[in-house]
Image (spheres, rainbow, N blue to C red):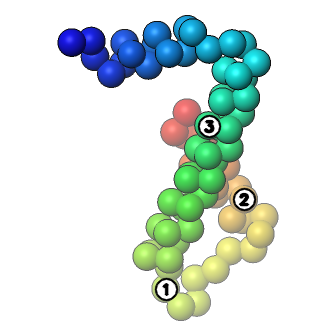
């Protein structure tokens, strides 16, 4: 029995290029949405009353965290 990973590779190899590009765009957007959702959930769990960031500070923290995970 082939592994799921091999099956996925075979599926991707069979996809037309335009469908593969569209799928990649959708997966990228989904990844960013999930990343932001996790950041929001983390903030809801860890922030206490009185903790807050300006928009610029929040964007800086999120972008630094994202770059460290790459």
The residue depicted at 58 percent of the width and 82 percent of the height is: 51
Any part of residue 57 in sight: yes
Give me the disc on residue 62.
none
Q: Nearer the viewer, residue 46 or 38?
A: 38
The residue depicted at 66 percent of the width and 29 percent of the height is: 24
Q: Nearer the viewer, residue 28 or 13?
A: 13
Any part of residue 64 in sight: no
> Where, quadrant-wise, is the C terminus in this rendering?
top right
Q: Say which quarter of the image contains residue 61.
A: bottom right
Q: Which residue is under mark 1? A: 48
Q: Residues within 10 Å of mark 1 (few under 14, many from 20)?
A: few
Q: Residues within 10 Å of mark 3 (few under 14, many from 20)?
A: few
Judge depth for marks 2 and 3 and give the one in front: 3
Q: Is residue 15 above or below residue 35?
A: above
CA distance separating discs 2 and 3: 22 Å
> Residue 43 placed where, x, y %?
52, 71
Q: Say which quarter of the image contains residue 56.
A: bottom right
Dot 1: what SS? loop
Give me the disc on residue 59.
2
Q: Is residue 8 above or below residue 22?
A: above
Q: Which residue is under mark 3? A: 27
């Amino acid at each position: 029995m082939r592994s799921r990973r091999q099956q996925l590779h075979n599926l991707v190899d069979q996809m037309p290029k335009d469908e593969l590009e569209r799928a990649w765009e959708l997966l990228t957007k989904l990844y960013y949405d999930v990343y932001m959702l996790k950041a929001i959930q983390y903030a809801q769990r860890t922030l206490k009353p009185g903790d807050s960031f300006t928009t610029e500070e929040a964007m800086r923290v999120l972008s630094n965290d994202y770059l460290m995970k790459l």
